[in-house]
Image (cartoon, rainbow, N blue to C red):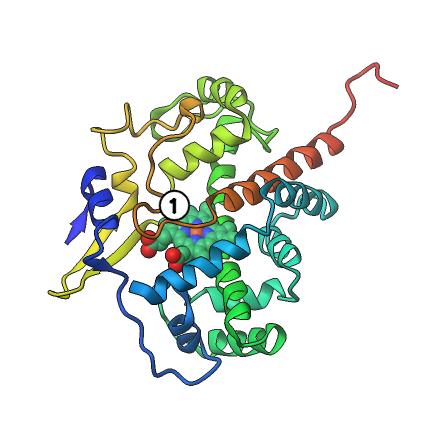
Amino acid sequence: MVITRHDEARAVLADPRYVPPPVRQDAPPYTLGWLRAQVSRFSSGETHAERRRALDKRLAQLDPAALRRMAREATLERGGDRTGVPTAVLAAALGVAAPVSLVEAAATGYLSGEETPEADAAVAELTALLGDGPPAVTDLTLLLQAHAATEGLIANALTHADRAGVAGSHRDQGGAAAPHGDQGGAAASRGDRAGVEGLLQETLRHDPPLKASRRVERTTGEEVVIDLVAANRDPAVFADPERFDPARGETPHLTFGHGLRPCPASAHALALAAGVLDGLRATADRSAPLPEGDL
Ligand code: HEM
């Protein structure tokens, strides 16, 4: 069953009868399958509650404002080369030596469960570097969950910024038509007023980096796919839902999940993405030619 309505999606995500699709528990140690069997994300019941408490405790040690500053500085230092910045900053803030390339290789199959030799090798290397006990698994799951989603959010936000000429993008100041029929100029002026936060919030609603969430009904085994794109554009909840409008502010989008197991790091994700966009804007400001007449 595919769910597209916002109210139905919220109901499933808040209902304990619906759990994440179970993962195999017999994978050899230090493989991707082994890691997936250890983490909060794919567990349920008391095991999930316990692992989730460990995640919340670890995340409470990370200050989103500091993450944003670090992401800005790292992006600026790299001259605007943003790829990998969120993961590198998160690893530094956690105080772990986890190369971005290994996180990326392991993250590739983390959500889908596609077990490849590359992903297995990356998990083995990461556990050799970080350890294989519960604290290391907590840090690893944070890095793997964060990686693709945060990179995806930034990429999607930049696409909109480019089209509308807002935050982080000094190109195309309102000339081109923005997506879904919006006019670039109008979106640009709304976007400039709304700033980086407005751009990110609306990108989360309009173009979620993760397009779907899956659940299984515990007793019947029925699989439910929640179509986040459709739910985030449900006309019963969002006025003019197809229009990308950074001035909407915070909306009840479901991109960070809802109910029993929403993303525990939405503030951290937003801070990392905002920091990268701040850094891109600062890089562009630095390289912009001085106005004529300036000394
Ligand atoms: C734009 C970026 C992000 C998005 C859209 C996102 C979205 C989500 C969603 C929807 C879930 C719940 C999945 C479900 O309901 O089955 C989730 C879980 C999770 N996210 Fe995020 N996330 C993002 C960034 C991050 C970051 C930066 C971190 C870590 C610093 C993180 C850590 C986690 C963890 C550990 C879980 C599992 C929670 C649990 O097991 O209860 N996420 N995320």
Q: Position of residue 239 (x, y in %)?
A: 28, 23
Q: Is residue 250 visible?
A: yes
SS type, badge 1: loop
- The residue drawn where x is 52% and y is 66% is 140
Of residues 149 and 281, the one drawn nearer to the viewer in this rendering: 149
Q: Position of residue 197 (x, y in %)?
A: 51, 31
Q: Quadrant of residue 40?
A: bottom left
Q: Is residue 219 left or right of residue 127?
A: left
Asked if the residue at label 1 sits under 8 Å from ligand 1, the reply is: yes
- Is residue 125 placed above or below 21 in the rendered structure? below
- Is residue 36 placed above or below 235 in the rendered structure? below
Q: Quadrant of residue 223?
A: bottom left
- The residue drawn where x is 36% and y is 69% is 113
Quadrant (top left, top right, bottom left, bottom right) of the N terminus? bottom left
Of residues 79 and 222, the one drawn nearer to the viewer in this rendering: 222
Q: Position of residue 135 (x, y in %)?
A: 54, 68
- Is residue 53 placed above or below 175 in the rendered structure? below
Q: How many marks?
A: 1
Residue under pointer 1: 256
Q: Is residue 44 visible?
A: no
Quadrant (top left, top right, bottom left, bottom right) of the C terminus? top right
Q: Is residue 48 left or right of residue 6?
A: right
- The residue drawn where x is 56% and y is 23% is 173
Check disc 1 and give the amino acid type.
Answer: Phe
Categorize mark 1 by other alpha carbons within 10 Å: few (<14), some (14-19), many (20+). Answer: some
Q: Position of residue 226 (x, y in %)?
A: 24, 50
Q: Is residue 58 left or right of residue 79?
A: left
- The residue drawn where x is 50% and y is 69% is 137
